[in-house]
Amino acid sequence: MQTRSTPGAMLKAMREKPPLVQCITNYVAMNVAANVLLAAGASPAMVHAAEEAGEFAGLASALTVNIGTLSTQWIDGMQAAAKAATSAGKPWVLDPVAHYATAFRRDAVAALLALKPTIIRGNASEIIALAGGESRGQGVDSRDPVEQAEGSARWLAERQQAVVAVTGAVDFVTDGERAVRITGGSALMPQVTALGCSLTCLVGAFAATVPEDLFGATVAALATFAIAGEEAALGAAGPGSFAWRFLDALNALDAETLDARARISAA
Ligand SMILES: Nc1ncnc2c1ncn2[C@@H]1O[C@H](COP(=O)(O)OP(=O)(O)O)[C@@H](O)[C@H]1O
Ligand SMILES: Cc1ncsc1CCOP(=O)(O)O
Ligand SMILES: [Mg+2]
């Protein structure tokens, strides 16, 4: 992996100076994602109102924008925050939840892409459709394997000049030149709602910590989820106990364990 620092070193740096991350996320994910960021060692703030989202982006070290439960007022807030983050040179992450489902979502995502997200994180169905491909997605859950989204992700990364992360059983990250696959996690993860949305917020937290290495930051966030997910699955009886075990595992994960266990390979 060609990054300046290891995932563990980035996790340690994040905990030493918890970054303020503005998360514009959906109603389903707000509480889950805030707890995920706190457990990992970052400081979340769910601030989306059009009246203040742009101003708040000036205070935060990174922004994440998720269209999961969209409404017109929220779009204004998303755009104001994205413009403020871009003009301040701060990283911002787009999560295009089910953007293929309706014209309202498609238009919102097109406008957000024009505001140049520095990182895009989605599941395979979302990334395939974002690149104009034939996706089998309908709702918020993926119906396509990550392998089939790799070409779409490379194309999108080049076109948007952004880091693109596709998540699923094996994650894939590319900046258009470099590409890696990350293995780990658990089949219970897609059984718990909003873990993908929470991961998007965690990508924002790592990006805030190492804004000079957005590729490495994205890989580190995904590797953190992969190892915490594996650990949580060990004692989980199902999605319910997995959810709380995942928060505990995330909180207990240390830099050395992350670096020793992360499985990241060039793609
Ligand atoms: N079958 C699986 N096995 C292991 N990890 C998975 C699996 N499916 C999803 N994950 C993990 O779950 C997290 C959320 O990804 P995903 O389910 O793709 O997002 P979304 O919720 O946006 O669809 C990621 O960390 C991903 O690696
Ligand atoms: C169920 C649902 N409906 C609208 S947003 C949302 C949450 C989606 O979360 P994730 O993409 O992390 O599975
Ligand atoms: Mg999602």
Image: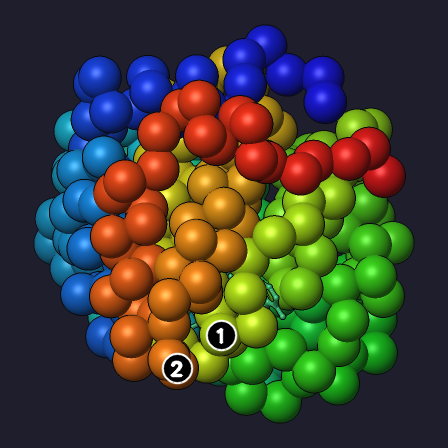
Image x and y of residue 244, in percent: 24, 66
Q: Amino acid under label 1? A: Leu
Q: Is the CB of the residue bearing disc 1 within 8 angstroms of ligand 1?
A: no
Which mark identifies residue 188?
A: 1
Q: Residues within 10 Å of mark 1 (few under 14, many from 20)?
A: some
Mark toward the start of the polypeptide (1 vs 2): 1
- Which quadrant would residue 240 be assigned to in this image? bottom left
Q: Position of residue 12 (x, y in %)?
A: 33, 20
Q: Residue at x 57, y 72 (%)?
A: 187
**Amino acid type for the residue under numbered disc 2:** Gly
Q: Residues within 10 Å of mark 2 (few under 14, many from 20)?
A: few
Q: Residue at x 59, y 10 (%)?
A: 4
Q: Is residue 153 left or right of residue 68?
A: right
What distance separates the C-alpha of mark 1 from that of mark 2?
A: 7 Å
SS at badge 2: loop
Q: Residue at x 31, y 69 (%)?
A: 243
Q: Nearer the viewer, residue 61 or 218?
A: 218
Q: Which residue is mark 2?
A: 238
